[in-house]
Amino acid sequence: MSYLGLKAFHLMAVVTWFAALFYLPRLYVYHTQALSEGDTRGSERFKIMERKLYRGIMMPSMLAVLLLGFGLLSLNWNGYFQQGWLHIKLLLVILLLGYHFWCGRLLKAFAEDRNQKSQTWYRVFNELPVFLLIFIVLLAVFKPW
């Protein structure tokens, strides 16, 4: 596959992954609300939605981002790794992976009825990937170093 083909599919996977990263914690907010209201049917529905989003969209998207990203890097390993901006971008992607798997741990806590976090905590948690997205995109577009 050509560089532009890899890049196009990589960007599509990134968009899909971020959509899921933004939506799953929002579901946690609503799930916590349902629990505080004693809505057990709603809570069970959220468990299904969260599981399907994480396993059916978030995980495959993340894997596609990583595989396609490595594919892009493999086209010019030496050239890319001499660019400082890429080191910072990859560090931010590692932080994003940590966030992704943290979402998975929270999913497990909800599935096992062990959630200890508040709606407010999830509302703040939901904003974290926004900052990573901003910095990753700015680094990739402007390549400052």
Image: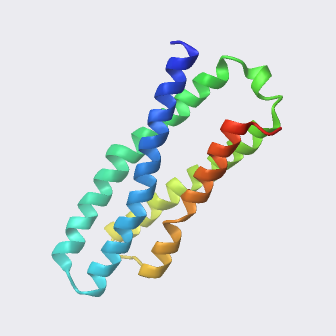
Q: Position of residue 118 (x, y in %)?
A: 44, 82
Q: Is residue 45 left or right of residue 128?
A: left
Question: Residue 28 appears at what percent x and percent y?
Answer: 37, 69
1 or 54: nearer the eye? Answer: 1
Q: Residue furthest top?
A: 1
Observer able to see residue 116: no
**Residue nearer the viewer, 140 or 66:** 140
Q: Residue at x 58, y 17 (%)?
A: 3
Above or below, 138 against 82 in this view is: below
In the displayed structure, 47 sits above or below 98; it is below
Color encoding of the figure: rainbow
Is residue 140 something one can see in this rendering? yes
User: Looking at the image, is 116 positioned above or below residue 45?
Assistant: below
The answer to which of 94 and 142 lies nearer the viewer is 142
Q: Work out which quarter of the rendered image holds the C terminus and state it.
A: top right
Q: Residue furthest bottom?
A: 37
Q: Residue at x 45, y 45 (%)?
A: 17
